[in-house]
Amino acid sequence: MTQQFEKVRALTGMKDILPHESAAWETLEAIVRDWLASYGYRNMRTPVLEQTRLFARGIGEVTDIVEKEMYSFRDALNDEQLTMRPEFTAGMVRATIEHNLLYDRPQRVYCMGPVFRHERPQRGRYRQFHQIDVEALGFAGPDVDAELIIMLARLWKRLGLQDIRLELNSLGQQEERAAHRQALVEHLEKHIDVLDEEAKRRMYTNPLRVLDTKNPAMQDMANQAPRLFDFLGPESLAHFEGVCARLKDAGIEYTLNPRLVRGLDYYNLTVFEWVTDRLGAQGTVCGGGRYDGLLELLGGKPAPAVGFAIGMERLLDLWQQSEAEIKASECDIYVIHQGDEAQRRAALLAETLRDEGYRVLVHAGSTGFKSQFKRADASGASVALIIGPDELAAGHASVKWLRQQEGDTRAQQEMLAFDAIAATLKTRM
Ligand code: ATP
Ligand code: MG
């Protein structure tokens, strides 16, 4: 007797995307690729695994991601500490430096795919999720900062999204942040009694992140904290105003959110998020900003850069609220047959139809006509071809239109010679 095998299940927070869901994903991906191409962005693909120290350095030691969310392990074979990418930017910047991509011109690039974070799973928060990550490397802005935001507005419009709004802030430059930091630490020290453990731990290492807290007991303290925006000098303000002016040109509304600091350490100047109230607690669909120091921090020649990441699960969730039916059909033509010989004729016919670019499903197995028709209907095909013994003898197939709407003048069912089918369908479909 074989021992019973205990069923294996997918890991918590890591979802299977099943055939009935993948149509929406593929449609979205196709729209996204067109959209990115229309702004001259080119795809790049970096490995899922990188050295842990890339993320520790690139994202920042004192961040949620590096402190507690990374899937890291030691590769005993090479004695290396590795991490599954929790975001794309660090890997893309590493690749840019490693292959010297900026040697003669700036680069507009994007990645799309899974990233991994060990978080508590809930709606809009998974352990394997997908991002569209877009980076403009070697551009100082503010024109490109604005272009990225305007580009996002175009995508939302293309998808028909509703209730998505833009929040904007500037994190200034290092000296401005240093001055603000001092004032902020003093403020935190004064309110030490309301700080939670995490805040106390971070108040000297990354005080700005303390303001990013979701703890309700700390909101008053955070609201009264000195605002980094008030510490910006004329150059940083001019950059910010440069972005705002271009958004205004494009008719894009925004709100200044002085508490917007983003989860990652490497940002400066422009930061932004697109948020919605339609997704429950996880309402940030896209976050981004400028990170002029990162290339140098990771060992490259200094170069300015700006980019954003979209969470695809959240985007799909929002899109599906406005687009109820993103269901794609399995095929254009479903071929029904009866008898061994008819099946073989059907398979041949299907090949000639595929030559013409049609998506064709030939029914598999010997079932009655009735259940084959049901399958044909469920497949979403617009036409069924039927080959029974009579049709086979006459060299014809019956053609049945499955999705006729009112006013459609095509005969519901007709006979066509095998060698005329492809040409005739072309004029009718
Ligand atoms: P949050 O504040 O929601 O944790 P974050 O600041 O960690 O977001 P980023 O690192 O900026 O998020 O990632 C970019 C986008 O990826 C987010 O705006 C969000 O749409 C999406 N995202 C982040 N974490 C998750 C997750 N665990 N599951 C699904 N989507 C996520
Ligand atoms: Mg997070």
Image (cartoon, helix red, strand yellow):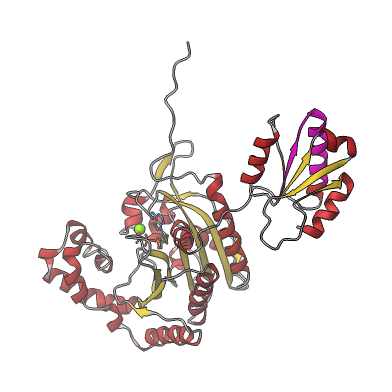
Q: Is residue 98 visible?
A: no
Q: Nearer the viewer, residue 24 or 340?
A: 340
Q: Is residue 170 visible?
A: yes
| Position in image of residue 359 (x %, y %) | 72, 49
Ligand 1 resides in the quarter of the picture at bottom left
Q: Nearer the viewer, residue 362 or 135?
A: 362
For the point 36% across and 77% down, the residue is: 169
| Quadrant of the image occupied by residue 9 | top left
Q: Nearer the viewer, residue 54 or 413?
A: 413
Vertical placement of residue 37 versus 17, above or below: below
| Quadrant of the image occupied by residue 396 | top right
Which residues, given as a range, are shown in magenta? 332-352
| Position in image of residue 200 (x %, y %) | 18, 61
* Quadrant that contains the C terminus: bottom right
Question: In the rendered structure, does residue 12 fall within the stretch colored magenta?
Answer: no
| Quadrant of the image occupied by residue 194 | bottom left
